[in-house]
């Protein structure tokens, strides 16, 4: 400040400008607060108006997806006091008091494996909204779940980084085909008979697509094999007839006379199909699953092994994958129902007692099968069959010789295991944990580009004999997960978890529509 | 089952980000209250103004980061959340703008100008300068009077804001003084002194104009920051209410 004085206060700068006569108060900042308060009032008024007259949509985090749009103006339908969001979801989506629940973590553990042992009830149940984020707009895909939600539990980064090999190919698991089948040999025959030029057309001769195109119908003898195999020329060799001290087969008349449960077919079988030469008998023609062959095989099995249990009700060996145990129960129930049907018209007291036992067993098995949470006890089928004690070696050898002769025609395709025909995997869907859609792939790649482990394309056109280790019945016939990763990678096409996997079970597989109807 | 790993609203991490952001926002808002209750704050030992300012600046910036993490770096779709998101950006951006202005303008004004004045006194000082200029010109020759009337008088009429000060704080003063310097070479020694004084007054007027122009944003940016930050707090309260209630 200049030392010069002007009035009482003085001057400043070389121009001697006057210093302020009094203290210059800075401008009040109250207008800032007034403007702010005014704006806040406007906002609060709008919110109160919205809550009062428009249902409070302004407080929403965003529009609901189109599936839930009808609930837009009723926040309380999902957000209600004392009720978790997951409970609100279940209110509509699980209206049947399902003990396991369709959308629970437990159901996720069980639905593919069918293994109740995998349920860990101590695991915290995740909220529906952890994966399905709402209020993201009408077009927001609720089912499009972030990869992070999956890899949080599954310990690999992505489909292309650490994803385990497909289960049927992992750890050198044996093929479950159960059939001695040469793919290339059959393709050659089909191409010749049907005059086909395209190898892949001959694949579709047996592998017939289901209507939805995702997979194929189960293989069926009558549809696919009957025209060439077991024609009228099919016959057993002459087999010894069972008698005192002789191991052999039972004749049709013996079976008719004994009238055991499940042998009603004998009453309707043409006796002219049998030829007897002294103490030996043969049958021609032979049919697929020929009841006379199957009955004698069952009887011979009973000579070798004790306590067949429920295995005796099955047509083939009970070696199924853990997720198919239900099939064993269904087969046993069908066998018991057939037996019960045959016995109902017979008045003998001992037959009625048999019928009572069968009915009880039938009810027990049915109850077990109808309960989706029942732990199906496969040990009742998968018995480790024990040879009868004290059986002479000669008897065993003689019995096995009769079995071999009896099943001579069967063994062209089937293998015999413990006096039973080995089960055939007719439903060839092997990727159980994922959904594979053949129709979605066939436009981009041909069958043999993926199913390339049997060199069908290279050898189908030739005539040379092919080693059985090369030309086999492998179901998957796939190199492995690497085949899929060639296309399903970040550079080409989707490799997201939900492209192939679903978290929740398919509801249609485990409950009927009645369970969804609110009966209250 | 581990917690969801998506960063967003619906999981533990998202909630933690939200709580952190809300806490920082309220802490930053307390700075305004601290300014209004300075005496009480000093008496209670609630920290220096500098530490509160640092909390306001750094806390406010971190709030924005946490808010974006809370929203999963996505645009919200709801009305309240949309306003909350937009106002958060606006408030932090206007705060950073104010910080930049406060760092830049005082430094420029202090280093390039010879006069330091309070914004509120500028009109009064301009009047004083004009009176001095008119008094000076009154005793000058006719050419000087004509020059003053034609070129300088409009400038002395009152404080004027000009955009040029944001680019050049001197406002291109040398080009404006060119005519006076030219005239100085054609006049008597006595008049040359008056022209020198007139040039100094003209320079002072332009410096006052520079203050008048550049000090305005220092005062006005608060209007873009404070009222809307109050609205932001209101929206935060609504958001917390909606989350807890629903």
Image: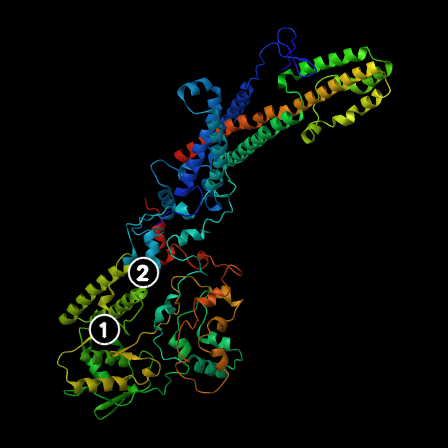
From the viewer's side, name the closer residue of B228 and A335.
Answer: B228
Q: What element does badge 2 sit on?
A: loop
Residue A86: quadrant of the picture: top left
Mark 2 vs mark 1, CA separation in Å: 24 Å
Q: Is residue A434 visible?
A: yes
Position of residue B210 relative to residue A387, above or below, is above
Tell me, for residue A312, which label it has, or none: 1
- For residue A114, the mark is 2
- Label 2 neighbourhood size at 10 Å, few (<14), some (14-19), many (20+)? many
Q: Residue A330 location in percent, x, y?
A: 29, 66
Q: Nearer the viewer, residue A447 or A248?
A: A447
| Residue at x 64%, y 28% (from the top left corner) | B108
Q: Name the element at disc 1.
A: helix
In this orientation, which residue lies closer to the viewer: A366 or A132?
Answer: A132
Q: Residues within 10 Å of mark 1 (few under 14, many from 20)?
A: some
Residues tagged by mark 2 and mark 1 found on one chain of the structure: yes
- Pointer 2 indicates a residue of which chain? A
Position of residue A238 measured from the top left corner of the image (x, y, whole percent): 26, 90
- The residue at the point 52 percent across, 41 percent down is B75
B132 over A265 or under it: above or below:
above
Label whose residue precedes the other's in the sequence (2 or 1): 2
Q: Position of residue A137 (x, y in %)?
A: 50, 43
Quarter of the image with the C terminus of chain B is top left
Is residue B81 shown left or right of residue A417?
right
B134 left or right of A478 in image: right
Kindly give the residue lying farthest to the bottom in the view shown. Answer: A278
Q: Residue A513, percent across and down?
A: 37, 53
The quadrant holding residue A479 is bottom left
Q: Is B78 placed above or below A433 here?
A: above
Tag 1, which chain? A
């Amino acid at each position: 400040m200049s030392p010069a004085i002007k009035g009482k206060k003085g001057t400043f700068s070389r121009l001697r400008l006057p210093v302020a006569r009094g203290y210059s108060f800075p401008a009040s900042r109250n207008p800032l607060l007034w403007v702010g308060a005014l704006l806040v009032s406007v906002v609060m008024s709008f919110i109160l108006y919205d809550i009062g007259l428009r249902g409070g949509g302004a407080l929403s985090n965003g529009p609901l997806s189109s599936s839930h749009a009808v609930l837009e103006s009723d926040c309380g339908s999902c957000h209600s006091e004392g009720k978790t969001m997951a409970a609100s979801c279940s209110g509509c989506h699980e209206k049947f008091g399902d003990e396991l629940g369709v959308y629970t973590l437990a159901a996720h553990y069980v639905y593919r494996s069918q293994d109740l042992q995998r349920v860990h009830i101590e695991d915290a149940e995740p909220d529906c909204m952890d994966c399905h984020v709402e209020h993201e707009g009408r077009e927001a895909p609720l089912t499009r779940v972030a990869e992070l939600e999956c890899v949080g539990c599954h310990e690999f980064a992505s489909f292309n980084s650490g994803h385990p090999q497909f289960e049927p190919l992992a750890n050198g698991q044996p093929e479950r085909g159960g059939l001695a089948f040469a793919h290339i040999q059959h393709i050659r025959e089909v191409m010749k008979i049907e005059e086909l030029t395209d190898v892949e057309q001959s694949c579709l001769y047996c592998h017939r697509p289901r209507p939805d195109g995702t997979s194929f119908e189960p293989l069926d003898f009558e549809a696919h094999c009957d025209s060439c195999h077991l024609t009228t020329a099919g016959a057993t060799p002459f087999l010894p007839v069972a008698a005192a001290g002789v191991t052999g087969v039972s004749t049709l008349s013996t079976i008719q006379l004994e009238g055991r449960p499940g042998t009603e077919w004998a009453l309707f079988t043409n006796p002219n199909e049998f030829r007897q030469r002294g103490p030996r008998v043969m049958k021609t023609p032979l049919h697929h699953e020929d009841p006379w062959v199957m009955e004698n095989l069952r009887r011979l099995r009973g000579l070798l092994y004790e306590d067949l249990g429920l295995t005796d009700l099955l047509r083939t060996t009970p070696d199924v994958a853990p997720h198919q145990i239900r099939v064993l129960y269904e087969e046993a129930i069908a066998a018991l129902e057939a037996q019960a049907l045959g016995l109902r018209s017979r008045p003998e007291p001992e037959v009625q007692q048999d019928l009572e036992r069968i009915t009880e067993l039938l009810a027990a098995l049915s109850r077990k099968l109808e309960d989706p949470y029942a732990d199906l006890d496969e040990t009742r089928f998968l018995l480790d069959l024990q040879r009868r004690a004290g059986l002479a070696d000669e008897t065993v050898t003689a019995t096995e010789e009769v079995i071999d002769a009896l099943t001579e025609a069967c063994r062209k395709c089937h293998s015999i295991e413990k006096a039973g025909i080995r089960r055939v995997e007719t439903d060839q869907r092997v990727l159980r944990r994922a959904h594979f859609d053949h129709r979605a792939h066939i436009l981009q790649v041909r069958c043999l580009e993926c199913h390339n482990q049997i060199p069908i394309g290279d050898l189908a056109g030739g005539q040379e004999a092919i080693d059985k280790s090369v030309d086999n019945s492998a179901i998957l016939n796939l190199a492995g997960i690497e085949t899929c990763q060639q296309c399903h990678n970040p550079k080409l096409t989707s490799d997201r978890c939900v492209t192939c996997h679903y978290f929740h079970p398919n509801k249609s597989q485990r409950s009927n529509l009645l369970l969804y109807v609110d009966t209250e | 089952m581990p917690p969801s790993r998506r960063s967003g609203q619906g999981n533990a991490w998202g909630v933690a980000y939200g709580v952190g952001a809300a806490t920082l926002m309220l802490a930053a808002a307390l700075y305004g209250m601290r300014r209004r209750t300075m005496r009480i704050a000093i008496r209670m030992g609630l920290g220096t103004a500098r530490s509160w300012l640092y909390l306001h600046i750094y806390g406010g910036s971190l709030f924005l980061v946490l808010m974006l993490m809370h929203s999963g770096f996505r645009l919200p779709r709801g009305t309240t959340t949309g306003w909350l998101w937009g106002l958060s950006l606006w408030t932090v951006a206007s705060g950073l703008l104010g910080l930049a202005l406060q760092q830049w303008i005082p430094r420029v004004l202090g280093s390039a100008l010879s006069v330091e004045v309070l914004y509120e006194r500028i009109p009064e000082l301009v009047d004083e300068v004009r009176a001095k200029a008119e008094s000076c010109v009154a005793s000058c020759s006719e050419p000087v009077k004509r020059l003053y009337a034609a070129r300088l008088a409009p400038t002395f009429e009152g404080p004027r804001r000009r955009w040029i000060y944001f680019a050049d704080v001197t406002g291109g003063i040398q080009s404006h003084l060119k005519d006076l310097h030219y005239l100085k070479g054609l006049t008597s020694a006595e008049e040359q002194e008056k022209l020198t004084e007139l040039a100094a007054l003209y320079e002072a007027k332009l410096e006052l104009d520079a203050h008048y122009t550049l000090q305005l944003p220092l005062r006005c940016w608060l209007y873009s920051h404070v009222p809307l930050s109050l609205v932001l707090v209101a929206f935060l309260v609504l958001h917390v209410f909606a989350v807890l209630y629903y």
